[in-house]
Image (cartoon, coloured by chain):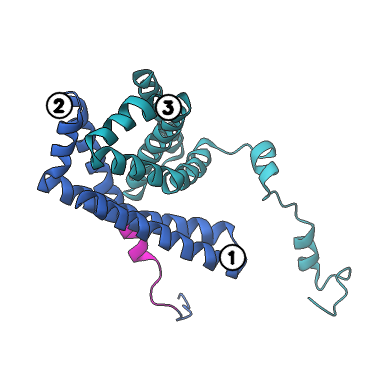
Chain colours: A cyan, B blue
Amino acid sequence: MPGRDLSEPMTTSAAAKKRRPKYLNLPAILFEIRLPLPARVSILHRISGLLLVFPMTAWLLYMLDASLASERGFEQVRGYYLQLPLVKLALIVFAWSFFHHFCAGIRFLLLDLDKGIELRAARASAAAVLVVSLLLTAVFAVALW
Amino acid sequence: MVNRIITGAHYGLRDWLAQRVTAAIMAVYSVIIAIVLLSGQPINYAVWRDLFAQGWMRVATLLFAASLAWHAWVGMRDILMDYIKPTALRLGLEILTVLLLAGYLAWAVQILWR
């Protein structure tokens, strides 16, 4: 606020508010706050969703386009492009993003229907989402390699 | 009593519901595609092309693409509203998101009906 001496508190409650510690910065969220599992699933839902929007959807459309354009394009994608180690690695990242977003999404739909909203059930389902999506990603990776 | 400040057209219920309906559509499509790809014959070009030449597959895939665009718009807007505070930057990123998603949808149409 311009023109006001900031060292002089307006009221005691405002001063108390000012001294409250704030942990809403990234290092604190990553290393200081021990987030409960449902919070981790939620933030990973956002991260995986962002990854799926960009670049994964663009990438998949590019491959779908090439593979449907001609037989040569199809063989290029399957026989050469998808065999590249870096491409396989990126596919595994896509698989995790998809499986996590899928599983966490089903969980959120059930929570919206008031299924499993008690603390114990919510934590258990959050753990299940993390485990199942990692297992599915592992199965995908094994099948790919 | 809730004192609402009447600005804007709606309060997000439509977005919330649309995000969930489109999620369900995409989930069903994903499961069906996984079953089709895993249970059928080995995929070669002819199988792949014939799959996407069928009417139901084109319509279902277009429905998926439209669902994705709407779903991702709601999700991206949530993310941008939460983390990007400067209005000009947020508006710019929202416009970029709309262009990106509209581009995806147009690209999907072009791939499906070429």
Number of disc labels = 3
Q: Position of residue A65 (x, y in %)?
A: 29, 44
Closer to the eye: label 1 or 3: 3
In the picture, residue A122 is in which quadrant?
Answer: top left
Q: Chain of mark 1?
A: B
The stretch drawn in magenta includes residue A116: no
Q: Are marks 1 and 2 on the same chain?
A: yes
Is B86 situated above or below B29? below
Residue at the location (80% across, 72% down)?
Answer: A11
Q: Chain of mark 2?
A: B
Badge 3 marks a residue whose secondary structure is helix
Mark 1 surroundings within 10 Å by alpha-carbon count, few (fewer than 14), some (14 through 19), many (20 or more): few
Sequence-earlier tag: 1 or 2 = 2
**Residue, disc 2:** B40
Q: Which residue lies most toward the left here?
A: B55
**Secondary structure of the magenta portion, mostly?**
helix
Q: Chain of mark 3?
A: A
Name the one closer to the observer, B82 or B114: B114
Name the one closer to the observer, B82 or B101: B101
**Left of A123 or right of it: where is B46?**
left
Is B94 situated above or below A28? below
Badge 1 marks a residue whose secondary structure is helix
Give, as a three-letter code, the residue at label 1. Answer: Leu
Circle on res. A88: 3
* Quadrant of the image containing the N terminus of chain A: bottom right
**Left of A52 or right of it: where is A115?**
left
Mark 2 surroundings within 10 Å by alpha-carbon count, few (fewer than 14), some (14 through 19), many (20 or more): few
**Residue, disc 1:** B89
The stretch drawn in magenta includes residue B20: yes
For the residues labelled 1 and 2, the Cα–Cα distance comes to 48 Å
Is B81 situated above or below A44? below
Circle on res. A85: none
